[in-house]
């Protein structure tokens, strides 16, 4: 109705509304780590976004995220005639609400230059105002001194890279050499063009593979069913669900990207996710030649299996959170049943190879 | 992606996105008038809302509205440390986008006082800044001089009226006597308590019956399927789809309210809507005693018929935009088939009585 | 609950349930003809289907169809140990319910031979039992004597035609020469492979282009949102909605096929459908160089426009029953705005070319 | 396409279709038992149903059921002119498919008499033909000799009990005395009228509380979203997922009923379900007076909490598979936070009282 500061007020009063509930994003933890779901790139009215910072917090909480960064542009502020010039305004407004909802709010900003170097997010900063200076390297240096994780954003964005091919320019290599570049966006908004190049850059330079929404409008209007069931997120494999663990894991490169119906990440992370999610059941029938058994995919990520071995289904889609029945030759009680997982990208031209063990009892 | 002023930019470039399409709200025109779908109560970041003014325009366009008023509070501006103190800011930002999309943008504001007089919207104003003064009557007088239509908002809101019963206080009667009050909200946001009282106030004082969203957050998150298929709107029966015709019709009281699965309005307007939407087909079977025929409801408003006559269905729901088959005694070829339409409210304790003629050929 | 003959019983008693309503399929009529929506290929438990004939009638009625044929196999009856050997059983059971619901029930059967000739539906027959004989040509002759329309089914079905290419064999050409073959399925179930070949066969031999579900299971489980919004149907352009008009139109080849998001039919039928569905509005803005206007698609068929002329959107999707805003050079007030409609197939390698006139007033 | 025996054929060939996947019904196991989801009442074309037995098996498998009984009427067979008079036909057809899919198919039938005794299902029978005799007690005796579990069906069905009040007649009491009545339907199809009476009958006579679909049409058309997310099922708390364990648990009365958004069952079963599903998280904020924490409902059953204690939300809905944030007085770190669960019925006029412990670490 009227005169309410924000939607959350309703919950504070203890009642529950349609939207005041938090979804569970079902991507399993992996041995040794919790899998945090994070969006490290978003905008508000304080740069060129359409929403107030509290809306971003509410969206992230309802979407089941563990961490969010609001990263308004420093250099591009088309609303500036109508808003405060405090570059920390979004942070100041969002932080108390995030605390009330146990959302890890990462203080961030987007350093917005023409190519090269293009756009870079500084995450885990202390003060955005001090990053509003001309000299690019000085800005990065200042951010790094604040403890920032620096992410190179949407390197294949056609407005900046007309052929769509992600590239590292000398300035980026210089940053890498100094330890001032820590991650690259493999995925941004809806972007899929030539991403896999980014995986190889990250592998070579030991950077974190990142994926974020870069949302400007409303999240639920940007990623709508049936086309999208969730926003793109960076999965961070952290020791625990704290700001410190999150930061440690990112600097250590323990990340993957979940976008649309796909996952991208190095095998050391995506392999354990697959194995945690996909389980075959004990065969319930043996007709002499074949065994019949179920495979359950206990995750929100469908698994698209291809290249099945002889005597087993050549292709098999394991829908999210569902069970599929399989009939396969008895030999797979003794030898591994191995597939390529076509929607889990592990590098340029490579996808996850995964074994599905069939239990005897 | 990044650095885009607003979602519409995409359309301006000529391509089409998921959200860049306009829904058609199927409520029929009535003889002599077009039925305009309007929301005369909404907020942005410039008072206590969560979105930028262009988001409101985009929502209204996609929702199929003909007219929208942004009505930020004059006296209640919790974001004021971070935003401009220009009370016309939302209007200035929204107007060019509305023009590009052929949305009738009504310049408005919400005069926000404690009870009485409570909250009143001034619609069709020229300048909100000049309405920021202490003396309530002077403010209304100034608005009226600008040509404003004055709407008394959510008269049963419990924060202001603890028993939930809408009342006209002496100050309201004084406004009415001067011709300075022109409509009352029968419906606001999700509010249904004791609304029918408002219909009688409007009938007695010849005021327009109004219904609006009073949205603060995101429209698509406030009214979600399956519970809500559309936001609440004021239907205005105008000579044509122009700002001038809209204004004329509102001052003349030619309005109704479509909220949830219900309609509220005087019989002179709701009767013609029912007759335009609901049509029986020629009976296709006659078994000697009964005739079999279809009834089509060509509107987005389901019709809930009760109190059917003998030999016809006692109750009959005509779902929106669907066909229902009916079997009824042959006598209804000759005498009227009459129902109460339980979800079309025509006053306090009264609903529409409607005849469905069965055509012979 | 229990002991009810079929779901419709509920309606007969005059009350209404969730499923007892009929959807409106919004494909417009064309000048001179009503557009009947028909499925001429379906199965029940009396051959290899999973449902009782009354379920087929209920599905067709709820789906908004005008006509349905149940076409159980004569020669393939895997349930025969458990069901009657009366080949007209499905017809006898379904007909009274169809009459109660004003559904045009076409008496049909599927003559089921190996290739060639393959499978052919005989529609508008009088008695299926008399078609249960060995000699194929005698069967067709007998059906034709009953007045049957003969349809060659799924000519590219890989179980019968391993390369998937539809072909007319000598036996089919013999049927055509005698006037004993009247239509060919361009679309069957989910099948899209090499269909366009069928359009050319139909053009050359003056046969009707057909498209049907060939449903064996439950329609609502076979065509589910979001992938499918409706079953595939043959559109028949008939003088009126009667069995006789339907039959006349089919023998005259006045048909098209609506499947998924696409339409296939000769330009003389699909052109008028496009023109009846798609309307530009009067431009509401002129910025000196460009005009701004809406295009409304008043049909359930989205229109995918490609190859737009200079100064207009190169591509434009007009979603079903929605409005899209367009900005185009002013010259299109004077010269035609022409597009290819990529999802309206008019022949092998050809799609509809369509003009969208922009009204001045 | 064509000539396929049933939908499952597709899976047997190793590929996967839209419908060839099995949903997981998320109702937790309870200490000592697995929670089997079962429907013990359904019909096919062999009595008055609309579908072939294999459709029932496919529905049950896709719906995530563990066990299904097909229970065609012995005495009411309106399709008998067109189908076999073998009363075991449905069983014979369905059994091999159920075995291929690891669905526990319970051999059953519905003994269909006028009131009293009304309709009773005999479950776990060996032969339905031998139960087709006139004398009711003899029929039950024969079923019991086969090992049958006897269920009294829909005791409040208005066609048999016009006032809708479930009653045990002398004949039922006689059955109970002999141990020949083992369960009563608390829920049937959509029926909710006066069910709680049934709970007290079951408590007094130590019978199993049952709830089933009694489906005649298509399951997915009978229980549609958003109104229904699943069919009504009997939950059976069995030692393991086998026919023998199922039977043992039913005779021991270890059952509950999950229907719509509600659960009915004695506290010894519903209490553990609540405790397995609902978990509070460690408080993440303490503002001196209140603690802030999440409550997760890890089940498909929403929990509607009412009667909250002072300093905690008076009402709280825990949506299925979601998280809700709660703010409550610090005292609930030390004393139990107790609610009534209004949608878990434990008897006539009673609902579950449940404590939610708040963990310290």
Image (tube, coloured by chain):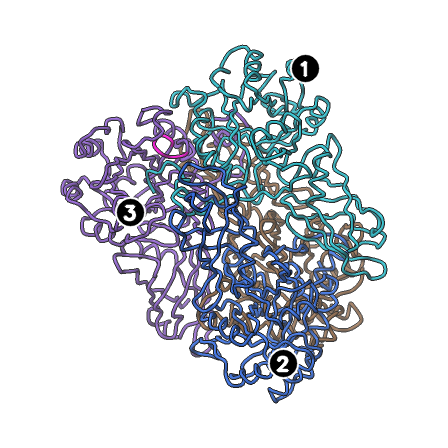
Chain colours: A brown, B blue, C cyan, D purple
Alpha carbon of mark 2 to alpha carbon of mark 3: how far?
A: 60 Å
Residue A314 location (% of width, % of height): 57, 32
What's the chain of the residue with tag 1?
C
* Residue in front for this viewpoint, D336 or C64: C64
- For label 2, the residue is B74
Alpha carbon of mark 3 to alpha carbon of mark 1: how far?
A: 63 Å
Disc tally is 3
* Residue in front for this viewpoint, C82 or D13: C82
Using residue C168 as the reference point, say whether residue C339 is left or right of it.
right
Residue B109 location (% of width, % of height): 64, 76
Q: Residue at x 52, y 70 (%)?
A: B186
Q: Is residue C149 above or below residue B230?
A: above
- For label 1, the residue is C177
Q: Is residue B97 above or below residue C12?
A: below
What's the chain of the residue with tag 2?
B
Q: Is residue B197 above or below residue A268?
A: below
- For label 3, the residue is D158
Give a yes or no on whether discs 3 and 1 share a subunit: no
Which mark, residue C262? none
Range of magenta residues: D45-50
* Element assignment for label 3: loop
Using residue A183 as the reference point, say whether residue C60 is left or right of it.
left
Can residue A233 be seen from the camera position used here? no
Q: Magenta segment: does it hold D46?
A: yes
Q: Are marks 1 and 2 in contact (CB under 8 Å)?
A: no
């Amino acid at each position: 109705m009227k005169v309410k500061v924000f939607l959350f007020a309703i919950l504070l009063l203890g009642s529950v509304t349609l939207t005041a509930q938090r979804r569970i994003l079902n991507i399993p933890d992996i041995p040794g780590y919790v899998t945090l779901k994070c969006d490290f790139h978003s905008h508000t009215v304080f740069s060129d976004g359409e929403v107030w910072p509290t809306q971003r917090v509410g969206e992230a909480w309802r979407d089941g995220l563990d961490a969010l960064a609001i990263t308004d542009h420093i250099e591009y502020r088309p609303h500036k005639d109508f808003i405060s010039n405090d570059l920390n305004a979004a942070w100041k407004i969002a932080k108390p609400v995030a605390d009330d909802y146990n959302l890890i709010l990462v203080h961030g900003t987007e350093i917005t230059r023409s190519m090269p170097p293009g756009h870079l997010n500084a995450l885990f900063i202390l003060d955005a105002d001090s990053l509003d200076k001309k000299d690019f390297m000085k800005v990065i240096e200042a951010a790094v001194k604040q403890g920032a994780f620096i992410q190179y954003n949407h390197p294949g964005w056609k407005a900046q890279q007309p052929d769509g091919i992600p590239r590292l320019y000398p300035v980026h290599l210089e940053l890498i050499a100094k330890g001032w570049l820590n991650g690259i966006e493999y995925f941004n908004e809806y972007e899929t063009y030539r991403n896999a190049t980014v995986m190889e850059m990250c592998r070579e330079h030991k950077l974190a593979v990142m994926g974020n929404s870069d949302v400007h409008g409303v999240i639920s209007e940007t990623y709508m069913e049936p086309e999208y069931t969730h926003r793109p997120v960076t999965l961070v494999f952290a020791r625990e669900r704290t700001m410190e663990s999150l930061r440690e894991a990112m600097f250590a490169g323990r990340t993957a990207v979940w976008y649309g119906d796909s996952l991208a990440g190095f095998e050391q992370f995506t392999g354990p996710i697959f194995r945690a999610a996909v389980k075959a059941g004990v065969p319930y029938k043996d007709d002499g030649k074949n065994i019949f058994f179920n495979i359950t995919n206990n995750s929100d990520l469908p698994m698209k299996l291809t290249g099945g071995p002889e005597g087993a289904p050549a292709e098999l889609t394991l829908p999210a959170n569902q069970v599929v029945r399989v009939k396969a030759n008895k030999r797979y009680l003794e030898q591994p049943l191995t597939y390529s997982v076509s929607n889990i990208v592990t590098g340029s031209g490579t996808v996850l190879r995964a074994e599905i063990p069939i239990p005897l009892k």
